[in-house]
Each structure stands twice: as C-alpha cells, then as structure tokens.
Amino acid sequence: MVKLTAELIEQAAQFTNPVRDRELDLRGYKIPVVENLGATLDQFDTIDLSDNEIRKLDGFPLLKRLKTLLINNNRICRIGENLEQALPNLRELVLTSNNIQDLGDLDVLATVKSLTLLSLLRNPVTTKKHYRLYVISKIPQIRVLDFQKVKLKERQEAEKMFKGKRGAQLAKDIAKQSKTPCQCFSGELALKAPLSYQFINIDQITRYYTLIGCWKRCLQKFTPGAGLQMEKKAGPSAADKAIASASSLAEVERLKGLLQAGQIPGRGLQSGDVEEEEEEEVEMAEPVSMYEENKDEEMEEEMHVNGS
C-alpha cells in the first residue's frame, strides 16, 4: 500500500476532463487512508480515488472547489461525519463497488445539502428493503440515484412512507446501524472462517467472505488457531473413553505408552485391537525363546566335550 503524501499528489496526473473540470487522478495506488489532500491547495473540481484500499470516507480538509468525488472499487464501509463541513459544495459522490452495509450508514449524507448525484451500486446496502425510497427521503434534493433519475412518483411514495409518527418509527427501525463494528477498522475482528482460513491474515479472510457474499453474517471475535485448539480438545476426550473401556491393567499401560508417544488412543483403535497387538507380541516372542533354549543346549554340549 502507498501512503497518500504531498509528493504523490504532486506527481499524480492532473488534467482538464471532458466536462471541463480540473481533475486529479489518484487511481490505483492502493491508498488505505484519505490524508494530506490539503496539498492540492483546493485547485481541483474532481478528485478520482478509485481502485484504492480506502476503508472510511473521511480525512478531507476544507475543499470548497471540489464538486465531484469518485471513489469506486474501494473497501468503504463507513462514511465519516461532518463531511458537509469539509466539502460544502460536493454535488456528485460515486461510491460504486464498496462495502456499505446498512441504511443507517447513509444518514450522514443528509447533511450534504449540495449533493444531487449519488451512486451506491454494488454495495450490500442496495439490497435492503425500501433502500431507494429511504435514500430519497433522507436526501430530498437528490436528482440521480445509482445513475437513474429520481422520478416525481418516487418522491411522493417516499414522502408518504416516512410521513408522521408511524413513518418516523419506520425510518428509525430500518435505519438501525449494524451493532457489529465494521471489520476494516478493528484488528481484533475477523471473519468466522473454515479451519483452513484460521491461520492466514485478516485481509485474505476478508476477500474470501466478500466473494461469497456473507460478510456481515460471519463477523465475530477472531481467535487465531481456534480450530486447531478444538481438535486438540478432542484428543483427551477420546483417550478418556479408551482408558475407561480398558479391561485389564496391561491395556491401561499400553494406552499410557501411546499417550506418552504422542498418539491419541481411541481413534480407530479399540480395546480388541490392543488385545490383538498383545497377542502378536507374544507370538513374536516365542521364536526368540526357542532360539535361546537351543543356544543353551549347545553351550552345555561344548562344556561336556571340553571336560571329557
């Protein structure tokens, strides 16, 4: 990742775009945090921060000239408060392909009175019930939402739905923000991943669950190696069962030897298996004892011959 510094801003492409606005191109640098934009000296109408790693929309200095902010393909899951104070003339905000989850996360945009175009395409929030009407009710001056013109009929429906005490209560209910903090702001949080994903870094887990679309459902406290600990706990339980089912002292000693050797008895090894192994050991011991008897007889014969 690259830090957004004054040097990077100075080296970035600066040009007049097709709508004759001065634009600063900061695409694709993998910038994690918005900072140091005071180095622009408020000389741009449009700033493009697409294809970076930004996680929270904040950190802007006072930029009175800025009208258009493009932040496609980032990881934004929260919008900072007091955005209207830093960007008092912001008209167009494009947040396509980010990770904004809840309708309540959009309430802060209600204070940006100059905002007329907003795109939240390919954000989880767009799947929420009453999404479009809720946004229209919160940002009444909005003209284009997700690149579709806001129609008079939609404005009337939004006003009717959220009018009066019942409407206010409905707005309050559907605007409840997620009680789980956004993962991208806390190193202590990670996704509940399969065992094979418990031992890799948080960013990889995040990408995995983002792809399969269950980010919010799976957020929880991250305990490295939790899956491995569960497997280890199963060991003593299996050993206890094997010892409890032992029918002889010899079998108990055998199980003790397995545990000392780092093996877990009880997994594919039953008491009958132990007895069979003991029988095999006895059978192996018989040829040895016969060999020793023959050897003793030969030694007696030699002593007898030498004595004679």
Image (cartoon, rainbow, N blue to C red):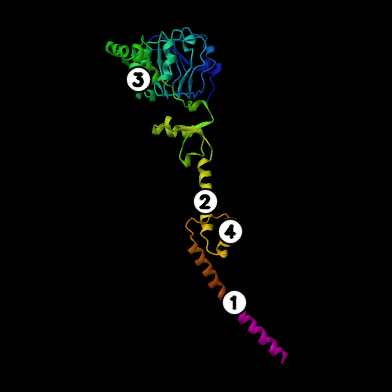
Kind of residue indicated by mark 3: Tyr
**Cα separation between marks 2 and 4:** 14 Å
Residue at 28 percent of width and 10 percent of height: 152
Between 241 and 4, the residue placed more toward the observer is 241
* Residue density around tag 3, few if under 14, some if 14–19, many if 20 or more, within 10 Å: some
Q: Is residue 186 left or right of residue 125?
A: right
Kind of residue indicated by mark 1: Ser
**Cα separation between marks 4 and 1:** 27 Å
- Name the mark nearer the viewer: 4 or 1: 4
Query: Which numbered disc flags the more N-terminal residue, 2 or 1?
Result: 2
Q: Which residue is mark 2?
A: 237
Kind of residue indicated by mark 2: Ser
Question: x, y percentage for residue 192?
Answer: 46, 36
> Would residue 149 be counted in the magenta stretch?
no
The magenta segment: 289-308
Query: Which numbered disc flags the more N-terminal residue, 2 or 4?
Result: 2
Quadrant the C terminus occupies: bottom right
Between 146 and 2, the residue placed more toward the observer is 146
**Cα separation between marks 3 and 4:** 64 Å
Q: Which residue is mark 3?
A: 131
Residue at 33 percent of width and 16 percent of height: 133
* Residue density around tag 1, few if under 14, some if 14–19, many if 20 or more, within 10 Å: few
Kind of residue indicated by mark 4: Lys
* Residue density around tag 4, few if under 14, some if 14–19, many if 20 or more, within 10 Å: some
Q: Which residue is mark 4?
A: 256
Q: Which residue is mark 1?
A: 289
Q: Compared with residue 238, is residue 223 higher up or lower down, i.e. above or below? A: above
Tag 2 near tag 1, CB within 8 Å: no
* Residue density around tag 2, few if under 14, some if 14–19, many if 20 or more, within 10 Å: few
